[in-house]
Image (cartoon, helix red, strand yellow):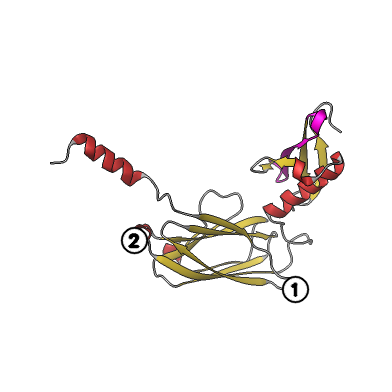
Amino acid sequence: MVRVGTAIFIAAIAAIPAASAKDSSTNVQFDKGKTSKSITATIKGYDTATYVLGVGNGQAMSVQFSPSNGACYMNVIEPHASSAVHMGDVAGNEYSTGATKAGEYKIEAFMMRSAARRNETCKFTVTMEVTGTPQGGGSAMPTEDAMRKECIGSAAGMYGTKPDYVQLAPERGHNSDGTFYWNGEVDKGSEGMKEFQCQFDKSGKLTNVMATTSDGE
């Protein structure tokens, strides 16, 4: 007979996610002159691998997922969405759309829970393609990493310091009109910490770096 205390302990242990699970995220950039890119990687157990792809409004996008394990799938998540627009275990290993929304699409590779519990391995290749000119012209939406770097570099220049002394909030903010902003601060040594905000338009272009402390530069 299992004692009540022991049963509760076992149940609690079973509910804890695998501590060894690794969640990786990669910002995808196409080589100059190319419209597609293939990436091969491996996940194991509860690992996930996420690929972040910036696209412009109205472009055509396709994703092909080729796994070595039949219990390995991909999900596709649209910009700013909280749930997947494409669930691989239901809709299969191919996704395409001829009218993308401007922003960052996330392609997430994962193992089904039954296979993850057995700590199975999946080697996969994911091929992403984006074609067409974004509506309104211009280039594709820059990745979040690219926007962060531009914000940090511009703030460092405005405050006359090194990028190493600039820190940004973990996530950017979204305005109701579709524009973006990023809050940050600069360590000015004896002058203290200076707060600022980087402002971006709907296409992800940096439009302004504004001091938000009363004594900011």
Q: Quadrant of the C terminus?
A: top right
Query: Crowding at label 1, few (<14), some or many (≥20) Cα neighbours within 10 Å?
Result: few
Look at the numbered disc 2 and give the secondary structure of its residue.
loop
**Which residue is labeled 2 in the image?**
118
Would residue 113 appear left or right of 160 to someone viewing this image? left
Q: Residue at x 77, y 47 (%)?
A: 151
**From where the camera sits, is residue 200 visible?**
no
**Position of residue 186 measured from the top left corner of the image (x, y, whole percent):** 77, 37
Q: CA distance from mark 1 to mark 2?
A: 42 Å
Question: Residue at position x 41%, y 59% from top?
Answer: 45
> Whole-percent x and y of residue 100?
64, 61
- Label ID, residue 130: none
Question: Where are the magenta residues, as a range?
Answer: 176-192
Q: Amino acid at mark 1?
A: Gly
Q: Amino acid at mark 2?
A: Arg
Residue 187 among magenta residues: yes
**Marks 1, 2: nearer the viewer:** 2
Please state the total of marks drawn on the protein image.
Answer: 2
Report x, y in % for residue 199.
77, 43
Q: Do callouts 1 and 2 mark residues in contact (Cβ within 8 Å)?
A: no
At horizontal 40% and vertical 48% (from top left) the residue drawn is 17
Corner quadrant of residue 193: top right
Identify the residue under disc 1: 33
- Identify the residue at the far top of this view: 214
Q: Secondary structure at mark 1?
A: loop
Q: Where in the figure is residue 81, as x and y percent of width and height? A: 56, 50
Residue 113 shows up from this direction:
yes
